[in-house]
Image (cartoon, grey):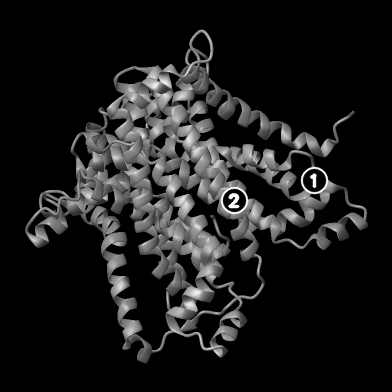
Amino acid sequence: MRMRPTKLILIIPVALLVVFFYVPLISILQTGLWDNGPTLKFISSVLVNSYHRRVIEFTVAQALASTVLTLAIGLPGAYIFAKYDFPGKRTIRAVLTVPFVMPSVMVALGFILLFGRGGIITDLIGHDLGILYSWKGILLAHAFYNFPIVVRMVSALWQRINPHYEEAAMTLGARGWRLFWRVTLPMLSPAIFASAMLTFVFCFLSFSIPLIIGGYRYATIEVDIFTSIMTLLDFRTGAALAVIQIVLSMVFMYLYLKSLDAYAKREEQRVMQRPRRMTLSELASLKGSLIITYALFIFIFIVSPLLAVLYDSLHFNGVWSLENYRRIFSAEYDPMFGASTLDAIRNSLTFGFATVFLSLLTALPIAYSMHRWNFRGKRVFDVLATLPLASSAITLGLGYIRVFSGTALYYTPWLLIAAYTIISYPFVLRTVSASLKKIRPNLWEAALSLGAKEWKAFLRVELPLALGGLIVGSIFAFAMSIAELGATYMLAKPEYTTMTLAVYKFLGARQFGSASALAVLLMLISTAGFLLIERTGEEVW
C-alpha cells in the first residue's frame, strides 16, 4: 500500500528521534541489562550498594520535598495573577518566569552570592544560615527554578473557572475557605497536580543544582551517573543507574501526561474571568497585607538571586566597576576555556538557532499528525514522541558516548545540537499542539471545500493562526539550548565552549565576578525572550 504524500512529513522527525534518542536509549539499556545475555546483576549491584541506594532514596525525597515547597510558594502567586490586575503585570510575570530558563549553574551562583560564607544575606544577619552545601539549599534552589510552572499553569486554569459555580455555592451559604475547599480547589486540582508532577520530574532529573549546592554528600542519581562515568570511568554502574532513572522517570512522566489530559480538558472552558484592579482600601486590609508580605517574600527568595548576580558583576574589589565585563572580553583571561568569551557567545547563539530550526522541524509534523489524523496506535505514538521530556541531559550524554564514540559525529557541534534538540523539542511540541487545538476545525474544512489540498490548507490557514505557538516554542527551545550544561560538559570540545559552560568554568576557578558578568548576559537574553512570550499570550507548559 502506497503511503499518502502527507504521511511522508513524519519521516524526518521520526528518523531524528530514532537516531538521536531511541538508539542511545537502547544502548544504555543494553549496557545496564546485558552481559552475554539478559541480566539484572548490574542493577542488583547498584541496589545492594548502600551509597547508591541512599542516592536513589535522596533523589526521590528531595524531588518530593522540592515539589511541596514549590507549590507552597507558587499557589499564592497563581491566585494573585488570576484574580487581580495591576500596572506592569505582564512584565512582572515575564521576569518571574525567567528563573525557569536560567542556566541552573547561574541559579547556583546566585545562591552562593546570597548564602555563602561571604554572601550578601550572611553579611547582613551576621552568621551563616547553613543553606549552601545542604539539602535546604537544594530545595530552595529547586523552588526558585520551578515556581513559575505553578504560577502560570494554575493561574491560567483559575481564570477559566466558570464564576457561576462559585456564585451558586455562595447562594447555598458557602463562603471563604469553605467555598475554596469545596468548589474552587476541586476545579483547580488538574492544574495543581499537573504542575506538581512536572515540577517533580524536573527536580528528579536535576543535575547542576545538587552538584554545586549540595555537593557529593547530597548527590542525586544525575550526579551519581556523572561521577561514575566522567570521574570513575565505570560505564556499567553509570548505565545501571541510568536504567533505574529511566524507569522511574517514565513512571513519573506517565502520571504527568495523564494529569495533563485532565488539565487540557478544564483549560478548554471558554469562560474567562477578568482580573480586577485592587483598590487602595483592599491593599490596607488583611488580604492586602498578606499579598504585600508574599510579594516581599518572592522578592527575597526569587528575585534576589538574580539581583545578587547583577550586583556582583558590577563590583570589583569592593567598588562599582565594569572590570568584570572587561575581563571576560579580554584575551588574557580566556586560556582556561580553550575558547574566548566571544567564541562562547557565538557558539551559544549558533547552537541555539540551529536547535530552534531542528526543534520546529521535529515538533511541527508530529503536532500536525496528532492534531489532524486518527490512526491505530496514536496514543502509543504520542507517548513515544513525548518520552524525551522524561530523559535527562546526563543520560543522553552517556548514550551519545556509547553510540557515537569513534564516529565522525563525535566531538562535533552537530552532536551537541542534536542533544539540545532532543532536550528542547518536547516544549515546542507542547506549545504548537496547544495552538493547533485552539483553531476551529471549520476553518480547515472551509479551505478544503474551496479546493485546497490538505497540506495547503494547513500552510495557508492553520499555520498562520498557530504562529503564536511557533514563536513561543522557538524562544523556549533557544533558551533551553543556551542554558544546557550536563550534555555540553560531556560532549563539547574546548573550542565549542558555550556561555553556560564558561560560567561553570569561571565558578570552578573561583572567579565569581567574571562568572556573574557572563551570567548577566545570559539573563538578558532569557528576559528578552520571555517578554516576547508575554506579548504573544501563549502558554509554554
Residue occupying image coordinates x 62% and y 27%:
18
Q: Nearer the viewer, mark 1 or mark 2?
A: 2
Q: Is residue 301 above or below residue 326?
A: below
Measuring from the top left, give residue 417's x and y in whole percent: 51, 32
Measuring from the top left, give residue 237's x and y in whole percent: 38, 21
Question: Which of the two residues, 96 or 226, is positioned nearer the viewer here?
Answer: 226
Crowding at dot 2, Cα within 10 Å, few <14 / some 14-19 / many 20+, comes out as few
Measuring from the top left, give residue 216's x and y in whole percent: 24, 33
| Helix, strand or loop at mark 2 | helix
Q: Amino acid at mark 2?
A: Lys
Residue occupying image coordinates x 50% and y 68%:
155
| Helix, strand or loop at mark 1 | loop
Q: Is residue 182 above or below residue 172?
A: above
**In this picture, residue 56 sits left or right of residue 307:** right
**In this picture, residue 358 sits left or right of residue 106:** right
Q: Amino acid at mark 1?
A: Asn
Residue occupying image coordinates x 22% and y 32%:
332
Residue occupying image coordinates x 64% and y 43%:
363
Most extreme residue toward the bottom, as rendered?
Answer: 281
In this figure, which residue is indicated by the disc labeled 1? 374
Q: Is residue 340 visible?
A: no
Location of the N terminus (image quadrant): top right
Q: Could you say which disc has been placed on residue 209 in the image?
A: none
Q: CA distance from mark 1 to mark 2?
A: 20 Å
Question: Which of the two residues, 140 or 525, is positioned nearer the viewer here?
Answer: 140
In this figure, which residue is indicated by the disc labeled 2? 258
Quarter where residue 365 is shown: top right
**In this picture, residue 130 sits left or right of residue 278:** left
Query: Between disc 1 and disc 2, whose residue precedes?
Result: 2
